[in-house]
Amino acid sequence: MERLPSTLRRHLAAVRAVAVLTVILGGLYPLLVTGIAQVLLPHRASGSILREDGRDVGSALIGQLFTDRNGRPVRRYFQSRPSAGGYDPLASGASNLGPQDVVDRLPDPRGADQAARKGRVSLLTQVCARSKAVGELEGVSGARPYCTADGVGAVLKVFPAVGRPTRVVSVNQACPAAPFVAAYQGVKVECGRPGEDYSSGHTVPVRGNVTDVKVPADAVTASGSGLDPHISVAYAELQAPRVARERGLDVGRVRTLIREHTTGRALGFMGERGVNVLELNLALDRER
């Protein structure tokens, strides 16, 4: 071996290192960890799969939708929080939209490309639309700050960007919708027109006078992974009357089931208590 050229010796050493590390880290270590997990935590190591009537119905670690084929909520079930990936484990992730994303791009049927024809919904309008839909489903007000009554972001574009305004547009309300405010600083507010470029205007979100928000934050925002199996206790309590009514159950019994499927804070102090939606819905089905 010493007679081999130094370059070849280095290559052979690298190949041996790769082979040894592959066996240790790619074979022995995973087998060891898997074996320990199967002995100590067999349910979690196998994916925390939940079974009902002899079949797998989901995982306690991954949320799922409780909607019909048209995407409408099935009223007899508790609903999960929104998901940017539709609870698809292969599409896990967030929308990557931040709190400054408040202006929609209105769909333009005459747009030059598909993106323009489809438009784009801002994070604010997504939140407003979800809050309105949840409010209608649960029979409460879905109003929240910075949202219009028709469920879009209450945002104005003011022209010019500095100085006294001469034109004001409610950019998220497509014509012929009536703007959520009639005037701004003495200037009549216009509805938004698809295809117009409003980027040069000054963006003015309008908070409105909503003080009592009925719909919890987790009902209108997705989790970072898009797979969160839990909802807040507040969101579960909001849904309890509707689920009880649809199933013909006493609402007190439904609230008892909520408490039974509420998990505590991580390590006793991190995060908030949560309700596992799949486990709760399975428990409800057993009540029949």
Image (tube, grey):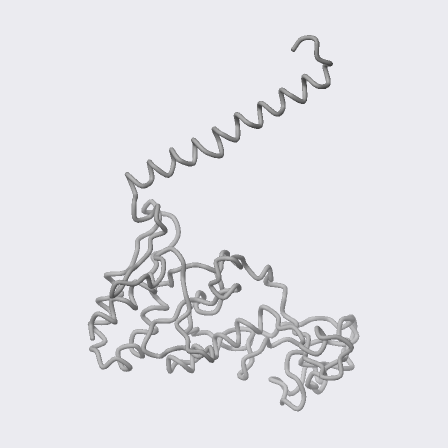
Measuring 49% from the left and 31% from the top, which residue is drawn there? 25
Number of disc labels: 0
Residue 244 x/y as whole percent: 26, 78
Closer to us: 214 or 206: 214
Closer to us: 144 or 87: 87
Residue 162 x/y as whole percent: 78, 70
Location of residue 152 (image quadrant): bottom right
Measuring 58% from the left and 74% from the top, which residue is drawn there? 125
Left or right: 284 in relation to 265? left
Measuring 69% from the left and 83% from the top, which residue is drawn there? 192
Residue 257 x/y as whole percent: 23, 66
Measuring 45% from the left and 59% from the top, which residue is drawn there? 227
Location of residue 106 (image quadrant): bottom right
Residue 267 x/y as whole percent: 33, 44
Quadrant of image for the C terminus: bottom left
Is 185 situated above or below 229?
A: below
